[in-house]
Each structure stands twice: as structure tokens, then as C-alpha cells.
Image (cartoon, rainbow, N blue to C red):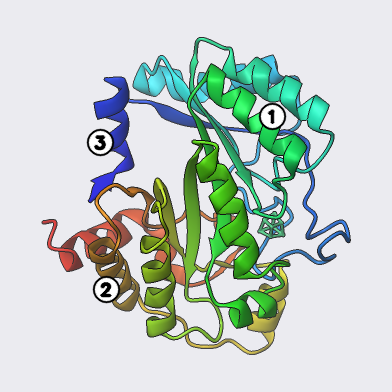
Amino acid sequence: MRFLSDYLKETYGEKIYKIALTSGCTCPNRDGTAGTGGCAFCSEGGSGDFAAPLLPLEEQIERAEALIRPKTGARRFIAYYQSFTNTYGDVKRLASLYEETARRDDVAILSLGTRPDCLGPEVMDMLRGLRKIKPLWVELGLQTVHDGTAEAFHRGYPFAVFREGYARLKEAGITVVVHMIFGLPGETKEMMLESVRTLASLDPPPDGVKLQMLHILRGTELGALYEKEPWPMLSLEEYAGLIAESLRILPEETVIHRMTGDGPGKLLLAPEWTRNKKRVLNAIRRKAGLV
Ligand code: SF4
């Protein structure tokens, strides 16, 4: 298995840090195109950890880098358009914004978070063009391969749509990072591992994965249900066991980008143990035999 920090050091010869940028896109799962309420776990920030305000690009980058540079001395960054659906909107405007981002010397990698149902021909042309400027990652929030679970949290597309979008990206030679969530309501541990096995069996397998525990956030549909009637969630030990098993299942070439999330702490209702990231990572390392 290979972790992101090792991959970045091996590939770029230096530590590269991520900065979160905002493209001004919305999400088809919120504006009525695929749905109106969004995914049941998604907060107003559109599933981003640290959504930056929509400011001119130069200003967004300066602000983000100013937070990281003094502590790390970092020279180059992953420009990560994380929140909402960053291939959903006026493609000309987006192409110009992303091209400007990719052409910067301080940007080593351009990363776009999106949905597999937002990869039409014009978007694919834009992505092919961007890929020629800088390494391009497209991050797809799949969360589960099980359509019943996805319907229940209103993902707004079936797994077959993910397969098509994924194939299109891979044919275009684009690096694809897939996001998965463990602990979705109604899913057994076997179902979670089946999702991981299905990802591992894709041909070619994903270039990267982000694994995280479901965060139940105040102000979301799941949050309202949980506040009314809490249900038992995976314990830290159970979660760590599932991640350790996933690391065994995923192929060597799939880079592990994340094993636990950074949800907005102020909104977090459950599980409490996700707040202590260090403890979570230590538990995973123990279960995976990495310590
Ligand atoms: S697709 Fe992403 S941004 Fe849209 S509602 Fe779902 S999690 Fe939120």
C-alpha cells in the first residue's frame, strides 16, 4: 500500500500541501437537476472540509498559502476545488478559472471534486486540455457501490453512472480519486467491504481513494433524524478494523489519500471519536499492523 505523502515525495521530490479553493459552482443534487435537498449527510458547505470564500483566484491562493507557508516552508501546492460539484456550471468560465490555476508555478497539481454525472463532452474536453498543463486529479464522491444505500441518502445517480464516468476519465488518462464513506445507515460491514472490493476490481483500479467514517452533522437531513432518535454507529475499533481490511483489499497502485475525515467540528453530532484524528490513525495503524 502507498500513502499520499509518500507518493507525493517520490513523485515530486518534495512535500506538497493542499489548499482548498472555491469555484463558485453549485451541485445538481441541490438545485433540482438531480435532487433538491442534497445528500442526506452533506452540510451547507457542500461536503467541503474548509471551503474558501468565493474571491478572485489570486486572493484565494494568497490567503490559503499564507496559512501554510510560514509553518511548512512549502513551495508548491495541490490546488483543490473541493466543495460542491466543480464541473457543474458554465464550462467556459470554469475552463478559464482552472487553466489560470493550473498555469501557476506554485500549483503542482490541480484537483477537482465532482460527480460522475457531471462529465459531459464539453467537460471532458476541458479536462483533457487541463491535463496537458498540469497533473490533473478528478475526485468522485461515490461513497458506496450499493444503489439501495445511495437512494436512501439521495446521491442522485446509480452505480452504473459512476462506472461510465469513471471509464470516460480513465480513457482520457486522468487520475481518479474515489471517496468512500463507512457507516452509512443500513450498511453492514460486509456491504462496506464489498464496496471496497468492487473498487479494487475496476479495470484499471482507482489511482487513489479517500476513506472516511460518516460524520453526522447538525443542519443536515441525517443530523435531524439522529437528533430525534440516535442510532448506534461504528465504534472506533470497528472502523479501524474495516480500514485495515480495506488496505489489504486495495491494489498496490491505488494511493491511500485519506483514512479518516476532518468534518466541521462545530457541526459534528456523532461519532464523537472522529474528533481525535491522531487516535483514529493510531488505531488504524495498530489494526493494519503498521506499528
Ligand atoms: S453531491 Fe456532493 S455537494 Fe452535492 S449534495 Fe452530495 S455531497 Fe453535497
The residue positioned 37% from the left and 75% from the top of the image is 193
The residue that mark 2 highlights is: 241
- Say which of 60 and 178 sits in front: 178
Q: Does mark 2 have its CB less than 8 Å from ligand 1?
A: no
The residue that mark 1 highlights is: 126
- Say which of 118 and 223 sits in front: 118
SS at mark 3 in the image: helix
Residue 226 at x, y percent in the picture: 63, 81
Cα gap from disc 3 to disc 1, whole angstroms = 29 Å
Cα gap from disc 2 to disc 3, whole angstroms = 23 Å
- Name the N-terminal-most of marks 2 and 3: 3
- In the picture, residue 96 is in which quadrant? top right
The residue positioned 84% from the left and 34% from the top of the image is 90
Residue 134 at x, y percent in the picture: 51, 21
Residue 218 at x, y percent in the picture: 67, 67
| Quadrant of the frame with the C terminus | bottom left
**Label of residue 6 in the image:** 3
SS at mark 1 in the image: helix
Q: Is 59 rendered above or below residue 260?
A: above
- In the picture, residue 32 is in which quadrant? bottom right
Extreme-top residue of the structure? 105
